Amino acid sequence: MATAKMDKRNRVRTLTQEEILDLIETQKVEFKEFQNAVLKTNLEIYNELNSLRKRIRELEEASSSKAIEIKEVSFEKAKDMVENFLREHLKENESVYPSDVADELGLKYELVRKVFDMLIHEGKLKIKEEG
């Protein structure tokens, strides 16, 4: 069995062949553990990516079937459209959200919200209290 030697001038210890082989074995084990951790992480990333791809496809399919064309109209025209819509809608429904009206009529939400505010101010529309 070879023994480790110490160089007194440089204070460097020379390793024996057995110590070198032990170090190599230890590094092999550590590398294998690292490799397994990387493979596990890659598999998790791959699964998450597939999940996200599937969700994107679902959202694209849902949005393509519900494409809404936004009309550019004046405030007065929008007010007439919203009032007519509300007259019909509220015959059968208790309430409606401005976002639903905007979607149904193809108007910008902000414009419909302003019309709602005006109708509330004029007393033609009331805010439904929750509860």
Image (cartoon, rainbow, N blue to C red):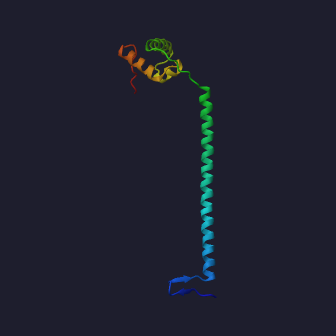
Q: In this view, does 126 lie to the left or right of 102?
A: left
Q: Locate the C terminus and report the quarter of the image it occupies.
A: top left
Where in the figure is residue 60, as x and y percent of width and height? 61, 33
Give the residue displayed 63% in from the left and 31% down from the top.
61
User: 98 above or below 79?
Assistant: below
User: 11 above or below 77?
Assistant: below
Give the residue displayed 44% in from the left and 23% down from the top.
110
- Evaluate whether residue 97 shows in this view: no
Where in the figure is residue 78, as x and y percent of width and height? 46, 14
Occupied quadrant, residue 76: top left
- Count every numbered label the image shows and give the total: 0
Give the residue displayed 61% in from the left and 56% down from the top.
40
Q: Is residue 53 left or right of residue 12?
A: right
Give the residue displayed 50% in from the left and 12% down from the top.
88
Q: Locate the N terminus and report the quarter of the image it occupies.
A: bottom right
- Evaluate whether residue 19 shows in this view: yes
Where in the figure is residue 63, as x and y percent of width and height? 59, 29
Looking at the image, the residue that sits furthest to the front is 9
User: 82 above or below 26?
Assistant: above
- Front in this rendered view, residue 92 or 74: 74
User: 49 above or below 104?
Assistant: below
Where in the figure is residue 21, as x and y percent of width and height? 63, 78
